[in-house]
Image (cartoon, grey):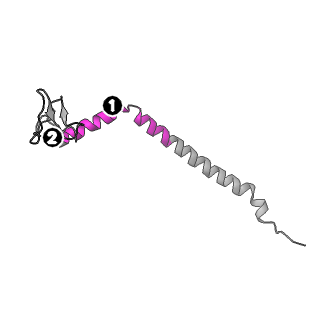
Amino acid sequence: PLPTGYRAPPEGVVLRPGLHYNPYFPGGAIGMPKQLEDGGVEYEDGTPATESQMAADVTTFLAWAAEPEHDDRKRQGAKWLSALLLMAVVTGFYKRHRFSIYKGRAIEYI
């Protein structure tokens, strides 16, 4: 909401020169002017360049830039889970084979 939340200040709110009103910013006064305008970018695939679309793109990029190791972590987690699954299957088959000699025995009580 911060990139798309710029509005005219409500009545009674006086802003100092150089500040802009954004209700999503703590205190409502922010020094950064509105950066996104409709049609500010031309997308290759013909996506309409609306303010909300550009804000979503900026947010997605910032999330990607904040965690460059995300894809490697995800791939490593998939490797660990597949290895654990393989070990569970191998352990299950080993247990069935190892304890199969006890399954055929009958316990007799005197």
| 56 or 49, nearer to the observer | 56
**Rendering coords of residue 73 (x, y %):** 45, 36
Which residue is at the far bottom?
110
Tag 1: amino acid: Ala
Tag 2: amino acid: Glu
In the rendered image, the quadrant that contains the C terminus is bottom right
In the rendered image, the quadrant that contains the N terminus is top left
Q: Predominant secondary structure in magenta?
A: helix
Residue 55 visible in rendering: yes
**Magenta-colored stretch includes residue 70:** yes
Looking at the image, tell me whether mark 2 or mark 1 is earlier in sequence order: 2
In the displayed structure image, the side of residue 63 where residue 50 appears, left or right: left
The mark found on residue 44 in the picture is none
The image quadrant of residue 27 is top left
The image quadrant of residue 8 is top left
Which residue is at the far top?
18
In the displayed structure image, the side of residue 4 where residue 89 appears, left or right: right
The residue beneath circle 2 is 51
The residue beneath circle 1 is 65
Seen at 22% across and 40% down, the residue is 24
Seen at 19% across and 41% down, the residue is 23
Question: Circle 1: is it few (<14), some (14-19), or many (20+) Cα within 10 Å?
Answer: few
Q: Which residues are magenta?
A: 53-78
